[in-house]
Image (spheres, rainbow, N blue to C red):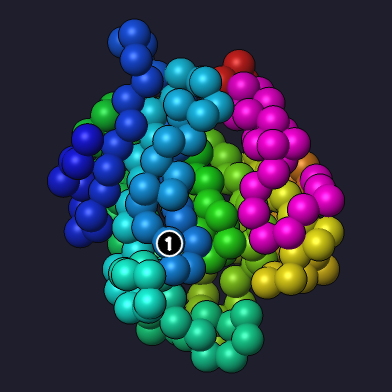
């Protein structure tokens, strides 16, 4: 279902036979992908979760068609400040719109992202800390663009799941470990898991994500 939310093109998955989803997950795709990539998360994980999947605002053209991104790069792993800041603003706006449109309490709204989407999910948490109930950052890293000053410098008590592949040849596993350490320093309640996988989400990793989301449902 295409739903006009904020300024981002967004698709929404509603779980069948559920009058009120237990969680709403804003699922943020990675570099070069699109909103379809994580849209089926609710169906695949078989959980009563609404999934809101936005499309990154930067269009990329390549041999296989169009893909999208959330920011450009100033250098390897460093977000270009202007495009990064614009996307943080758009996702913060989306959080507000989703909560208002679907009447979602903050503790029932989860940011989930893969790769560049994980970076954006962390950045969004640092922007709208009091409006979300957790972050799942899959195969990403902690954002440190030049000159960026997040609205919140602490994430005290915020549940955060960080996962990474030990064989990731796109974003080294050390970046995932460093992200988990930094998030702990900011006060987040971090669970960090590594898997014998490359730059993707393995079945074992998906099972951990599912269990973590179930914990958020019962919290």
Image coordinates of residue 20 in percent, x first then y, are: 35, 14
Residue 33's place in the image compared with 24, above or below, is below
Residue 201's place in the image compared with 208, above or below, is below
Q: Which residues are magenta?
A: 193-216
**Which of the pair 217/32 is nearer the observer?**
32
Residue that appears at 46% across and 56% down: 29
Residue 48 counted in the magenta span: no
Residue 6's place in the image compared with 84, above or below, is above
Is the residue marked by circle 1 packed among few (<14), some (14-19), or many (20+) residues within 10 Å?
Answer: many
Image coordinates of residue 43 in percent, x first then y, are: 45, 26
Residue 195 counted in the magenta span: yes
* Quadrant (top left/top right/bottom left/bottom right) for the N terminus: top left
Left or right of 55 in this view: 133: right
Residue that appears at 23% across and 55% down: 9
* Quadrant (top left/top right/bottom left/bottom right) for the C terminus: top right
Residue 83's place in the image compared with 30, above or below, is below
Question: Can residue 147 be seen at all in this image of the molecule?
Answer: no
Does dot 1 land on a helix, a strand or a loop?
loop
Question: Can residue 207 be seen at all in this image of the molecule?
Answer: yes
Image coordinates of residue 144 in percent, x first then y, are: 61, 77
Residue that appears at 33% across and 32% down: 13
Residue that appears at 35% across and 40% down: 52
Q: Which residue is mark 1?
A: 33
Image coordinates of residue 174 in percent, x first then y, are: 82, 68
**Which of the pair 114/213 is nearer the observer?**
114
């Amino acid at each position: 279902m295409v739903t006009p939310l904020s300024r981002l093109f967004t698709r929404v998955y509603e779980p069948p036979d559920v009058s009120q989803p237990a969680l709403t997950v804003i699922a943020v795709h990675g570099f070069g992908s699109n909103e379809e990539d994580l849209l089926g998360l609710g169906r695949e994980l078989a959980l009563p979760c609404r999934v809101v999947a936005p499309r990154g605002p930067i269009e990329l053209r390549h041999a296989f068609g169009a893909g999208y991104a959330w920011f450009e790069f100033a250098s390897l792993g460093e977000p270009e400040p202007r495009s990064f800041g614009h996307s943080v603003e758009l996702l913060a706006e989306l959080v507000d719109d989703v909560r208002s449109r679907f009447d979602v309490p903050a503790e029932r709204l989860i940011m989930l992202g893969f790769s560049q989407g994980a970076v954006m999910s962390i950045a969004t948490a640092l922007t709208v800390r009091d409006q979300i109930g957790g972050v799942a950052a899959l195969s990403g890293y902690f954002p440190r663009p030049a000159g960026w000053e997040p609205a919140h410098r602490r994430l005290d008590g915020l549940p955060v799941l960080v996962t990474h592949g030990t064989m990731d040849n796109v974003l080294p596993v050390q970046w995932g470990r460093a992200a988990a350490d930094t998030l702990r320093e900011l006060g987040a309640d971090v669970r960090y898991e590594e898997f014998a996988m490359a730059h993707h989400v393995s079945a074992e990793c998906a099972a951990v994500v599912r269990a973590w989301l179930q914990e958020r449902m019962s919290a």
